[in-house]
Each structure stands twice: as structure tokens, then as C-alpha cells.
Amino acid sequence: MSEEPLQRIHVGLGGWDLPPLEGIFYPAKPGRGFRKLAWYSRFFDFVELNASFYNSDLSPALAKRWVQEVAINPRFQFSVKLFRGFTHTMDATAKDLISVQRLLRVLRDAQLLVGIVAQFPSAFAMTKERLAYLQKLADAFPEDQMFIELRHRTWNADAARESAHTHRYCMVNTDLPALTKHVPLRSDAYNGHAYFRMMGRNAAAWDDPQKGDRYAYRYSEEELKELTTRLREVATVAPSTFVVFHNDANVDSPVNGFQLRKMLQPRTPLIAPAGLVRRFPELRGVADSEGETSELGFTPPSQESKVEPG
């Protein structure tokens, strides 16, 4: 396969304000005016906004600042995690809907929005009523691509996938610990989109906090090679493919992110923050330290269009 389809695979993390990354991915002593998102955008071209899950009232002015901060990277894209009132507590109001749409509009108008991520809890099993709810939820955001994550094993069904195709939302390919209740990882594409969320495979701690952080997991080289095979295949039918690493606990998410990008495009030079490379010397064969090759964490093609908003 040529590298052109692989250039449309966007790899990123589930947020940029992540405590484990302090002093490692980010500088230990940042200077005055330092902005984490601006720094992040030098090394990754995609992020899944997580703050929007907890707060439906993030202001458009804040989103405009984000747009300015990522201007250094012409490939940069956002997905926005939907407020939990729509997916978990089920108490979202019309005011919440309006607030979320205002935030989305700023990113959409800047051509930086790839879609909305609606992540439902593992206990959310498939029923006719819930299937109908997903259809209405997608209809509530007609201008944007909806990526819906359904973790319960009952959603691994043809009826669920057929509904997604019919109503033009995308079921997320989620990698989770191999527990009986969980769906298996798939490599599905919907309407030209494929979205992967890599949560780690820490089965022992997933439902038992006493055994550690559920997101403490490093994907091995073999596991990343298997993921690379999946992505190469899906990229032939999904012009827009996104991969989000959520295994943040031990700073494994950016490490795995750089490793995956190198596997996907081995001839493309990468740079990584110097602090990250010092902490994880295995990255020395993957990426140069920040500041040694260029100002960006990638080499952009001479001409490349942005991913079209959903």
C-alpha cells in the first residue's frame, strides 16, 4: 500500500490536560505564557476533547482560543466528547444541547471538527428503545459526524451496525480488556469514517481500583503491529480514520502514539518532546528529540487538504 491513505490516519490522545504527562511530555519548567494545547499540537495532529464530557457549558470564546493555539499545525483536528448528560446520567436539557452546539460551531467553522464522540457505559446494553435513542441523538446533531461507543457485548450485532449505516453514525471500534461484558475490537468503517479508541487491556484493575489504575497498560510491539494491520486495511475504505490512545496512567498513551505512527509511516520523520524521550529511551529509534529536526512533530505534505467536517 502507498503511504497516501495512511496519511489520512490521525493518531492522538484523549485530551491534552492530562496529569501524568506533566514534566515528561510537557516541559518540567515551562516558560511564561506556555499553553499545553499549543505544545501538544507540535507533536500530534489530533485530539479527543475530554473536558466537554464533564461540562456542557464550555464557552465559544474558549474554543476560539484553542483554534488559535493549534494554528501552527495545518493538519490538526478535534473530536469532541459529548456531555455525559446525554450518555450516562441521561438528564441533559435543551440548554445543554444549545451549549454543546455553540462549542461545536466554533470548531466546525474553523474546519477543525471531525465529529462528536458519544461514549456510553459498559452497562448500557442493547434494547429497541436504546437503539431508537441513538438514532434520535445522531439526528440532534445533523451537521456533525457522530461516533458512538457502545461497550456492552450485546451491541456486537448486525442490527446495531445496520442502524449505524442507515442513520449515518459511526460505531467506535473500542479496544477494551477481554471481559465477558465487553464487545471485541472490530475494524468497522461507516460512511467513509473509522474511529478507534484504545483503552488498554488491564483486565485485573478494570473493575477493581484496589488492583491499580485501569488505564495502566502499555501496548506491546506485537499488539501495535496487529493494530497497524487493521488500520492499513480499514484505510482503504475509510478516508477519515482516527485512533485515540487513552492508556494515560503511566504516560503510555503518547509513547504508544509515537510508536504506532512510526509503524504506519516508517519513512516519515517524527519528533517527540525531549523529556518524553529521556524517560522512555525506546523512543530514540522512533522519533528525534524536540528541537533537533524541526518545529513540528511531523513533516507535512506540500499540499494536503484538511479532513472534511462530518
Image (cartoon, helix red, strand yellow):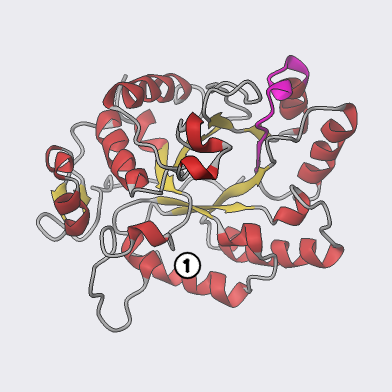
**Left or right of 105 in this view: 85:** right
Image coords of residue 258 (percent x, y): 28, 42
Image coords of residue 11 (percent x, y): 40, 42
Image coords of residue 16 (percent x, y): 43, 59
Q: Which of the two residues, 224 or 305, is positioned nearer the viewer here?
A: 224
Q: Residue at x 28, y 84 (%)?
A: 32
- Please report the bounds of the magenta region as a residue range: 145-159
Q: Is residue 133 above or below residue 189?
A: below
Query: Judging from the image, what secondary structure is the residue with disc 1 in?
Result: helix
Q: Is residue 240 above or below residue 21?
A: above
Residue 198 visible in the current orientation: no
Neighbour class for label 1 at 10 Å: few (<14), some, many (≥20)? many
Q: Mark 1 is on which residue type?
A: Val
Image coords of residue 177 (percent x, y): 51, 28
Extreme residue in the front direction: 210
Q: Is residue 165 magenta?
A: no
Q: Is residue 147 above or below residue 116?
A: above
Q: Which of the two residues, 28 or 149, is positioned nearer the viewer here?
A: 28
**Left or right of 32 in this view: 180:** right
Which residue lies under the disc numbered 1?
67
Q: Which of the two residues, 182 or 62, is positioned nearer the viewer here?
A: 182
